[in-house]
Amino acid sequence: MSDLADALREAIAGQSPRRVAELLDGVPERERPALRVVLKVDREGLGRPAWAVAAAGLEGGAAAVARRLRTAWMPGGHQPVEGSTSSFSWWAPGWVVVARVLLQRQVDWLPDLVVRLADAEVRGWGDSRHVLTERLRRELSLPRPTGAGYLRWAVGQWFGVPWQEDGLDRAERLRREPDPTALVVAVLAVPEIGVELQITRAAPTEEWWSPGWREALLDLVADGTLARDPLLDALTAALALGGSGRHQNSLAHLLGALDPTPEETAARFRDLCALLPEAAGTVADVVLRLGRAAVGAGAVSVAEAVETTAEALRRREKGVVRAHLRWLAGLPAQDPALRDVVLPALSEAFGHEHHDLAQLAWAAVERLLPGAAETVRADLLDRAAELPRDLQDEAVRVLGGSPGVTVPGEPVAAAPPGEPATAPPAAPHPPRVQDLADLVVAITEHTRRGRPADAERVLDGLARFGAQHLQALAAALAPAAESFSLGWERDAHFAPYPFLAAATRRPGSPRWRGEKPGRPGPVPPGGTGILALRAREVVERVRAGVAAPLLAFPDTALGHVDPGRVLADLRRAAATGVDPGPLDLEQTWLRYPRDVADDEHLARLRAVGTPAADRLAQHLSPGGLPEAVVQPVPVALQGRRYGYQDTSEHQDWPLVSLTGSVVDTPLVERGFDGADLPERVVRERWSGGLAALTTLAVLPSHREVAAGELLPPLVDLEHRHDAATTTTLALLPEAGGPTGRATHLALAYGLLSADERVRLGAVDAVHGFAVRGGLDATAAGAALGAVLTLDEAKLVRLTRALAPLAHDDRRGVREFTARYLLAALAPVVPLRRNGLSDLLALAADAAHGTGPHRPVPGLADLATSGGRSRNVTEARRVLAGLA
């Protein structure tokens, strides 16, 4: 120990990072505390990664140091100092050492490094890096960075909990900045920082109190520290950038709290009104309130205000639309000449999705119409002609007859059958890789995206070029070899990459290292397991020097193969004497479209005369693929709240029990080593969007299995999903195979999800089934009704999601939607849930002219219960549409 301590003292005194790193390499972590005591030095001086980075950085420059720092001090890359409770100790000591070394050496690229690190957006780096960077920046007199990472830290400094060191509140800390207005404007220009602003809105505790970020900014505006005009301009521009609803609401609250004068509002009126169609509800409310105040003060003309705010009447928020309707309807009382200006604006709400708001608009028009110009009446009639046919009776009653509208007194005619909705042709699969360079690009894309289509291109490229060009492939992939993580061999999508890592002499999985691949570990059944088994087969064939294209390479984007192309490839394989691998052959069979293997095709397969062709014909000869039985079962799981486990709550969520999945399929029933699995494979586990999309890609004729993969994450209605979930939902109608309870529940949970992307995917799925067939609308609607009875199910989400389909007059779409909705109403009607009236209105719109339909249990009781509630009114409309 004493010799090592002397050597370290000498290396530290001589500022030799390389020597320090070499000496510390052999010191066990448990002996380092004792070594610190012997040396009596700060623990910051013993961070080996710091010295290693400093040594490389002295030669490599700012870019090299910045790159090393991004990997050396991410959480998990450097163990915390023993006894420390702060995340500061994870990486900050290393950065201190690097900074000290670089300052003492006076390297000319140090300012560039400081700016790079200050502006870097690196997840997992805490505030300590920015504190140290800020200290160096000021010492070197560098300009303030403008990157999102630095600004996010700055927001925490200005508006976070007061530090114990200085005890300053938010406003006081910002007052010390040389140009606080410019900083606040820069912060508002980055929407992602809204998350940090929201976090600081927590209520004060008994231990301390400090004004929130909004109060701090208001105080700074009041005392002149912040200029009003630049702040208002920055808020308007930030709202135009969009962002999360929470972020927009936060900015809207600040805008309202600033209470702009009518003149300040008038200067930005057009820009603020441009936010009305898409902004969050709070933003629309604040903008309309400010606009009405500016009109009242004479800063904005009434005509301009009515014209620019009319689109607000199309919004979904009842409170916003109702308040604006009442304001517009009251303007002619101040000046009767305004009725010709107001009436066209009111027409924006004629077909509002909330029936009561539409009725409010019609009532206002009926009251203001006497005395209006004939041109205005004609314009209203033209707009009414664009309404759904079952709503035009209100236009007839209020506006009178017109060639474009049904004559008063005549019943509204049923919608004539429109053009049939046709399904688009199947999209082609991305092409095979053409050469070695194309394969390298495909591998790079796959490591970045991980899509099943990319995996197929990579496997096919390895099967064709891997054996002949192994060394060239290894050399081409050497620059990207650092991306081959040790853990990727456990992921089915990246199963071949440990082999590639070994080929490039990178650390890889032990079972792929050297010439002994060893026995592969167990692979779970399902799409990802099938992909992993096929990847292992490709690797083994490449090792054996076999070069042949994959027979199972998909011909359509969904994953089906072209039987004609398969037959041609089998004939070519017979001529060359290179048969496809057994798992490649099984995957080909699983990708066959349904009902295409007729007797003629089977005879052609047998005529090839190879064992592979005979095997494929034997699989297809019974007349189709065996079915997978998918049965959702309730399983007790811990509840989740705000992303954390809540052990006090439990909830029954349906998981999937998959039995007899494509019986006698080696890809599912057997492991790669040939060990038999149980006769009935039962799987109850969590899954996700990418797993479901992969299952759909490898089992495109068994969509019920992919729907079952979607259920576990979908049942959490408040969960945010990945894009693969939306894609899988939308592709279910295009896939083959029967549909059952798993598909019914996947559609129901998708339509009720809080994630708008998932709802859109579910709407695409319902539309696809309406066009292509394959789904029993009544049975699926019954499953939807069962899900609607859950407390967390919000009827308004379903109403908004299916509204486009309920008003789609193309043949088959509206009828299917009507049957789907009517079947879902039975369990919901007795509950009288919030949003029932809107759901009934949508069902009435869909059912009108598409009957006859089955009666809905309990609906007649609601319709005859008396009273004038909207539930009763809409129930009567639904009953009228059933006939």
Image (cartoon, grey):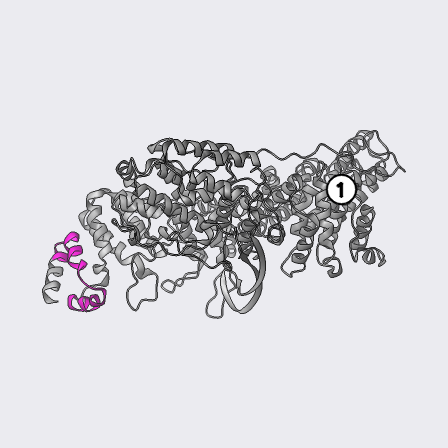
Q: Confirm whether residue 226 shows in the render.
A: no
Vertical position of residue 165 compared to residue 814: above or below: below
Task: Give coordinates of residue 606: x percent, y percent.
Answer: 49, 36
Is residue 21 rendered magenta in the image? yes
Task: Give coordinates of residue 540: x percent, y percent.
Answer: 33, 45
Count the marks: 1
Determine which quarter of the picture holds residue 728. top right
Determine which quarter of the picture holds residue 431. top left
**In the drawing, does residue 92 fall left or right of residue 592?**
left
Determine which quarter of the picture holds residue 381. top right
Query: Which residue does the image show at 60% across and 34% down from the upper left?
Result: 424
**In the drawing, does residue 826 fall left or right of residue 542?**
right
Viewer-closest of 116 and 759: 759
Vertical position of residue 544 compared to residue 791: above or below: above
Viewer-closest of 186 and 577: 577
**In the drawing, does residue 810 fall left or right of residue 683?**
right
Residue type at mark 1: give it. Leu
SS at circle 1: helix
Magenta stretch, residue numbers: 11-39
Task: Give coordinates of residue 623: x percent, y percent.
Answer: 58, 43
Task: Give coordinates of residue 499: x percent, y percent.
Answer: 31, 46
Q: Which residue is mark 1?
A: 331
Is residue 364 rendered magenta in the image? no
Disc 1: CA contacts within 10 A as few (<14), some (14-19) or many (>=20): some
Query: Which residue does the image show at 22% across and 43% down from the upper left?
Result: 60
Q: Quadrant of the N terminus?
A: bottom left
Q: Confirm whether residue 129 shows in the render.
A: yes
The prevailing secondary structure element of the residues shown in magenta is helix
